[in-house]
Image (spheres, rainbow, N blue to C red):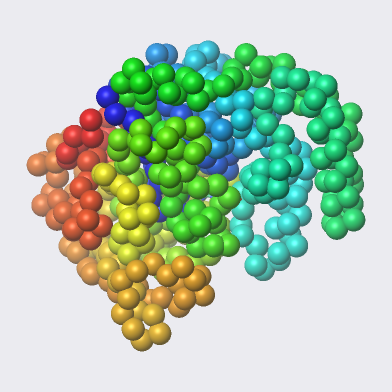
Amino acid sequence: MPVIAIVGAQWGDEGKGKVVDMLAQQARMVVRFSGGDNAGHSVVNPSGEFKLHLIPSGIFNAGVACIIGNGVVINPKVLIGEIDNLNELGVDTSHLFISDRAHLIMPYHLLLDGLEEEALGGKAIGTTRKGVGPAFADKAARLGIRAGDLLDKEALKERLSAVLDYKNVILTKVYGAKPLSLDEVYSQYCQYGERLAPCIRETTIMVDEAVSRGELVILEGAQGALLDPDFGTYPYTTSSSPLAAGSCLGAGLGPTRLDRVLGVYKAYCTRVGSGPMPTELNDQTGELIRERAHEYGTTTGRPRRCGWLDAVAARFSRRINGLTGAVITRLDILDVLPSFKICVGYELDGQKIDYFPGNIAALARCKPIYEELPGWQAPTTDIRSYEQLPMEARQYVARVEELISCPVNLICVGPGREQAIEKTPIL
Ligand code: IMP
């Protein structure tokens, strides 16, 4: 059985949670590898409807070890709330493990995420304000506190004391905010540590053993390629890599052991937060997609910006991820449209281009060049085989495959686990 990374191929919210939940039924391990509780993975399965922020979407399968990898930043309060919530709903979480190397979101990260955004005014990133950016900044600045630090209270106090002294200077002197109390933060994090200690371990050994035994291991991404700090619409990005390359780093697995990379695309595009989005629709069609698909952020409730599928961005994402296959989700949202568009190129300063510019000022000037396709105007939500899809829907899938140069493995036609059509086998 292979090791498969499942990654967001647009601006996040593509439906990775559903795909992971489906495949996890055959897996022995799911490792979440990046992001933090800025992510919101929606899962609808026989156990109920769930919104997961940190816990891997394989948690509903008792035999699947679920690991929060070293590449994730963890707000322990949010994680404990998520565990309690699942347990109350009858979902067993005894097979959840946390990498001792995963960094923690601290109270000052939450404060700074808000203060930094407010200081940016009209140029704000539109972050989820979950403290994710400041926590990854501290990781790079070697100021982070990690899950494993919770297991040694004395060392934790020493480290926290040094870091908090510095953070309090920033909070008070730069932003005029109140300082945080060492005793309060320390005692709060000691309590979190006591609660989470049984799950915290050296998880790379577990991952290595599962892969060596030939088990199906899924590396679950968060956010999407166009929010990657290197390749996304910088600086309007997130702070950890949602790419397949990030999956190896964030799970502690060497790149030679990754067998497949599955990119998840919505049948259209959405984005939350600021930054250019060439195919955004600020009209009734955009509104129709938003309402029909209930495109509101799982984590923040913000309305998502909606637009046509951008094949230029999709091709870029296929390339930087090295996708071996694609999943198209939410095809059913297009069921009512008489026709729809796909962006097949950009016009930049009077020139036609077919690549995704790295410079956001240039990207913001790109005007989409569209191809219009006929709609099928028939419900697809109950269809389970590719041949039964309306001809126009099959034409659409075939065109996407052609434009992004990647086979489509799976097509999703609703939120439920069973609402999926396998076009070509993933396993
Ligand atoms: P941050 O990751 O909270 O710092 O936010 C940075 C940018 O990434 C903002 O535009 C957010 O809206 C976006 N973002 C972060 N997480 C997600 C996600 O899970 N889905 C979609 N957008 C996200």
Q: Return the residue found at the far bottom.
A: 350
Quadrant showing the C terminus: top left
- The image shows residue 169 at horizontal and vertical percentages of 88, 50
Q: Relative to 214, is 246 above or below?
A: below
Residue ID at (11%, 41%): 388
Q: Quadrant of residue 183?
A: top right
Q: Quadrant of residue 418?
A: top left
- The image shows residue 134 at horizontal and vertical percentages of 69, 48
Quadrant showing the N terminus: top left
Q: Relative to 368, is 294 above or below?
A: above
State left or right for residue 398 relative to residue 226.
left
State left or right for residue 158 relative to residue 23.
right
In-front residue for pair 10/302: 10
Residue ID at (39%, 80%): 348
State left or right for residue 337 relative to residue 350.
left
Residue ID at (31%, 80%): 352
In-front residue for pair 195/136: 136
Q: How many marks?
A: 0
- The image shows residue 420 at horizontal and vertical percentages of 25, 36
Q: Relative to 255, is 125 above or below?
A: below
Q: Relative to 51, is 323 above or below?
A: below
Using the rendered image of the protein, determine whether residue 110 is visible from the camera's viewpoint: no
Using the rendered image of the protein, determine whether residue 93 is visible from the camera's viewpoint: yes
- The image shows residue 232 at horizontal and vertical percentages of 48, 59
